[in-house]
Amino acid sequence: MRIKKKSSLGTAALGALSLMLLFSLVASPPQANADAAAAAADAHSDAPADPQDKGETEAPPPPVKVVKAKDIAKLLAKAKGKVLLLNFWATWCPPCVAEMPQFIEFFKKYNEKGVEFLSLSADGAPQIDSAVVPYRDKMELPFPVYVLDEPDPAALTEAITAEPSGALPETYLYNADGKIVKVWSEEIDLEMLEKEVLPLL
């Protein structure tokens, strides 16, 4: 599957096809996903933390959950009253992996200031144990991770109140009223995030 850093919506037929390809969750073989996840984590993570630096009572990360459009709609509704970033990504997507440390830093700085983060992986449910969980653990992602399992592009469009372009990564910024105010169909960084998010806080 070809991964695009940035794309715009084409014809309706092409848009529908790109969504079906992107969210059909059969993007690459399990071993390819696992190898890509391991390589990506090694390339973009800092040195492993000393186990002794972690408290023995530290809670384990929440399980990676499979979600459909209706579940995403509920998560968005629950986040109303806060600024929300919704990020579509995959372990096999180089620009997704490249920007992930930026999201980690941003979340740690602003989560307690009224910013929520919704991380939606397009790896597919079969790749949870072989790719998504190992990548989450290696990167020590501080936010919950969900895996998208929605074969109906129309349902997904209704849930997020926008039509995904079919590109990865793609990130949506919602204000506290639950309205989309910015969409990035490209790799983004901390400076870009702060420029758009901070005026909403």
Image (cartoon, helix red, strand yellow):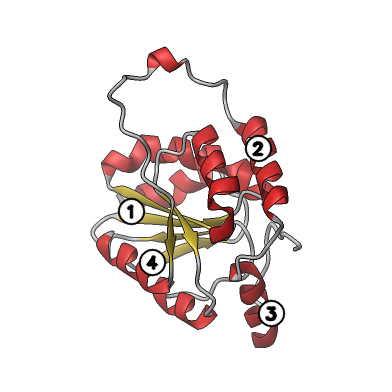
Disc 1 or 4, which lies upstream in sequence? 4
Element on which disc 3 rests:
loop
The amino acid beneath tag 1 is Leu
Residue 27 left/right relative to 114: right
Q: Residues within 10 Å of mark 3 (few under 14, many from 20)?
A: few
Point out which mark residue 72 bears. 4
Point out which mark residue 200 bears. 1
Q: Residues within 10 Å of mark 4 (few under 14, many from 20)?
A: some
The amino acid beneath tag 2 is Ala
Q: Nearer the viewer, mark 2 or mark 1?
A: 2
Residue assigned mark 3: 10
Find the distance from the CA under tag 2 to the CA under tag 1.
36 Å
Find the distance from the CA under tag 4 to the CA under tag 3.
25 Å
Q: Residues within 10 Å of mark 2 (few under 14, many from 20)?
A: some
Instruction: Look at the picture and state if 11 lies above or below 145.
Output: below
Q: Nearer the viewer, mark 4 or mark 3?
A: 4
Q: Is residue 170 visible?
A: no
Which of 27 and 84 lies nearest the eye of the viewer? Answer: 27
Residue 167: quarter of image: bottom right
Residue assigned mark 2: 38
